[in-house]
Image (spheres, grey):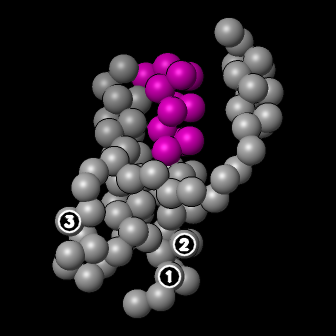
Amino acid sequence: MSRHDLKHLLDDVPDTRELILRRADPAAAAGRGAAYDAWNDAHEEAEAHYREWQLGGGGDAYSAYRASQDREDAAQDALAVAPR
């Protein structure tokens, strides 16, 4: 499947506005909540993709890093307006 085909496939997926987190909710118990967990997960993923890009290089690794960085930015924006 080409990148073009994948983009069109993903563009057709409806946005359900659901938030799916990687782990159980330990931050909620500490009072931080789902917005923090989403940002933290995205931040960790962006760091991991950055390291992969730095170690192996290449366009695919860079694309993965940028996509995860965009998710981190979006999660940070959501965290900024989340109720405290």
In percent of width and height, residue 53 lies at 40, 30
Residue for point 75% across, 26% down:
9
Q: Amino acid at mark 1?
A: Ala
Q: Can residue 54 be seen here? A: no
| Camera-nearest label, 1 or 3 | 3
Q: Which residues are magenta?
A: 57-68
Q: Is residue 63 above or below residue 74?
A: above
In percent of width and height, residue 5 lies at 76, 18
- Residue 29: say if magenta: no
Counting labels gives: 3
Q: Dividing the image into 4 quarters, which one contains the C terminus?
A: bottom left
- Check if mark 2's residue and mark 1's residue have beta carbons within 8 Å: yes
| Camera-nearest label, 2 or 3 | 3
Give SS at disc 2: helix
Q: Which residue is mark 1?
A: 82
Quarter of the image for residue 59 reads top right
Residue ranking furthest to the bottom: 84
Q: Is residue 62 above or below residue 21?
A: above
Query: 80 or 13, which is in the foreground?
Result: 13
Residue for point 71% across, 12% down:
2
- Dot 1 alpha-carbon crowd within 10 angstroms: few under 14, some 14 to 19, many 20 or more: few
- Dot 3 alpha-carbon crowd within 10 angstroms: few under 14, some 14 to 19, many 20 or more: few
Q: Is residue 70 above or below residue 13?
A: below
Q: Which residue is mark 2?
A: 78
Q: Cα distance, mark 2 to mark 3?
A: 19 Å
